[in-house]
Image (cartoon, rainbow, N blue to C red):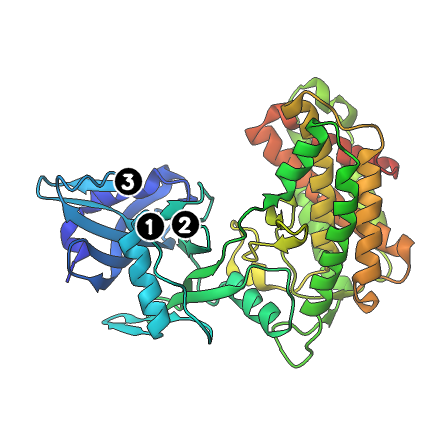
């Protein structure tokens, strides 16, 4: 069987890995990269294997990544994701190789276990018909921490590149939502993982592909750009309803320890305030001299005081939530219904953080901030600003739909208390957005600035 460590030198492996978008660390901090687990899948041409690689850093820490590996004869014509070519064989990242995908699906359908010296690779699928062998495989697009391929426009396979110890929230949430009858997801069709002394981790999941759909971000910008802004308003109301139903289902099983709702503690809110305080201090201490930032100059203490004033009173209960909720994470399908995707949470956070219970209003705040971004992005990308009052109308319709559908025991009592806590989470989001835009997209910095100013002034968006 293919022995990955014998095929690729550490220097070659490091050069490839550090050039990938899913590699999330600074190359200058890397002390070394090596294969620590090789799971042979097939020895015939192309030879296929799953590798777990360890990236070691100078402070003594490390990260683990998944790397599918293929090896074909030089001259075979394979050119995608090439890692090295020694003149006899080309070795490549096999994520987009149809043969690799077919092998994974075969193992899932067999519910196979592959034993290695370091552990076991487990392949599983739900009861029912397994995914048919695909004839066409294509990459879904570059992603920050995972890689996805579409299979015959019928299914999608997602591989988690950076691995964390424990079950991935994507798999855990999809299992729970499926078992509890939530229909607005792409059904889970299979998964694979690793258990053993190196790590217990989810490696990937397979789901139905929502063909003929449009994600919420593209939909909003398309309707704003084509002069049909009101058409999005009804969609926003329905999205609010579906979001409320999602949170209600996630809080519906007190017997499931990982999902049972919990009361929000005063200590938890205080910790939130302290964490955001530190971020505010860092950002406002070194604000660059940009015209868009003038309204915030010298107002860091005011932002902290506003946050503290909002963090009072009842905060409802905490539940498992989406964790990275915005317009890019929802699809409007061909029937006009919303489908929610990507339950893995924010990729930069640890699995423990992503699996932690939070206020459901964090998800709501994320979507409200996404509406604010869409309103301004239409001016930047479409050269056509959203009509005055569009964001406020979309926001109201979404919130009305949400509050009608959500379990009210999860929320602070009354609309005013809900809006107050929402402002906490929106202010938190806007502060982190400000840091991101300053680092990556200075031309977009006006969006989080407007959000922070609105929270300071206590006004609704217009």
Q: In this image, 276 relative to 421: left or right?
A: left
Horizontal and vertical percent position of residue 100? 29, 56
Residues under numbered marks 1 and 2 in contact, where contact means CB atoms less than 8 Å apart: yes
Q: Quadrant of the C terminus?
A: top right
Q: Residue at x 16, y 61 (%)?
A: 43
**In the displayed structure, would residue 462 be above or below residue 5?**
above
Q: Earlier in the sequence, mark 1 or mark 2?
A: 1
Q: In this image, 88 relative to 139: left or right?
A: left
Q: Quadrant of the N terminus?
A: bottom left
Can you tell which of label 1 and label 2 is closer to the viewer? 2
Q: Earlier in the sequence, mark 3 or mark 2?
A: 3
Q: In 3D space, how far apart are the residues under numbered discs 1 and 3 (Cα atoms)?
A: 9 Å
Q: Earlier in the sequence, mark 1 or mark 3?
A: 3
* Label 1 sits on residue: 95
**In the displayed structure, would residue 202 be above or below residue 17?**
below
Horizontal and vertical percent position of residue 421? 81, 53
Q: Residue at x 80, y 36 (%)?
A: 230
Q: Residue at x 76, y 28 (%)?
A: 386
Q: In 3D space, how far apart are the residues under numbered discs 1 and 2 (Cα atoms)?
A: 8 Å
265 or 447, nearer to the observer? 447
* Label 2 sits on residue: 149
Disc sitting over residue 80 in the figure = 3
Residue 448, can we see it?
no
């Amino acid at each position: 069987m293919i022995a990955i460590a014998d095929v690729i030198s550490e220097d070659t492996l490091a050069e490839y890995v550090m050039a990938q978008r899913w590699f999330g660390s600074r190359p200058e901090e890397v002390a070394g990269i090596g294969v620590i687990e090789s799971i042979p899948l097939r020895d015939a041409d192309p030879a296929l294997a799953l590798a777990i690689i360890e990236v070691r850093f100078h402070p003594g820490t490390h990260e683990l990544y998944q790397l599918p590996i293929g090896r074909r004869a030089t001259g075979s014509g394979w050119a995608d994701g090439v890692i090295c070519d020694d003149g006899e064989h080309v070795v490549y990242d096999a994520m987009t190789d149809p043969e690799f995908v077919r092998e994974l699906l075969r193992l899932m359908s067999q519910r196979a276990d592959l034993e290695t010296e370091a552990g076991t690779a487990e392949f599983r699928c739900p009861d029912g018909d397994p995914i048919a062998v695909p004839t066409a495989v294509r990459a879904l697009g570059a992603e920050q921490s995972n890689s996805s391929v579409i299979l015959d426009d019928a299914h999608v396979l997602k591989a988690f590149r950076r691995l964390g110890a424990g079950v991935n929230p994507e798999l855990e949430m999809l299992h729970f939502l499926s078992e509890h009858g939530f229909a607005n997801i792409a059904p889970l069709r299979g998964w694979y993982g690793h258990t053993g002394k190196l790590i217990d981790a989810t490696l990937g999941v397979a789901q139905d592909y929502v063909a003929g759909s449009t994600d919420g971000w593209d939909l909003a910008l398309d309707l704003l750009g084509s002069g049909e802004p009101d058409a999005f308003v009804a969609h926003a109301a329905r999205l609010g309803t579906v979001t409320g139903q999602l949170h209600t289902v996630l809080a519906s099983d007190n017997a499931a320890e990982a999902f049972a709702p919990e009361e929000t503690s005063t200590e938890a809110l205080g910790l939130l305030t302290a964490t955001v305080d530190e971020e505010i201090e860092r950002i406002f201490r070194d604000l660059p001299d940009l015209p868009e930032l003038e309204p915030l100059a010298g107002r860091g203490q005011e932002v902290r005081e506003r946050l503290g004033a909002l963090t009072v009173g009842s905060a409802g209960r905490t539940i498992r939530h989406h964790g990275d909720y915005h317009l890019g994470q929802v699809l409007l399908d061909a029937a006009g219904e919303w489908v929610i995707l990507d339950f893995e949470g924010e990729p930069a956070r640890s699995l423990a953080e992503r699996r932690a219970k939070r206020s459901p209003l964090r998800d709501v705040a994320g979507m409200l901030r996404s509406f604010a971004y869409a309103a301004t992005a239409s001016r930047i990308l479409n050269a056509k600003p959203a009509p005055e009052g569009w964001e406020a109308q979309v926001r109201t319709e979404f919130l009305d739909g949400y509050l009608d559908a959500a379990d009210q025991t999860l929320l602070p009592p009354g609309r005013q208390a809900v809006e107050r806590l929402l402002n906490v989470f929106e202010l938190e989001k806007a502060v982190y957005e400000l840091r991101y835009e300053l680092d990556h997209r200075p031309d977009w910095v006006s969006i989080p600035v407007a959000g922070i100013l609105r929270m300071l002034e206590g006004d609704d968006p217009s």
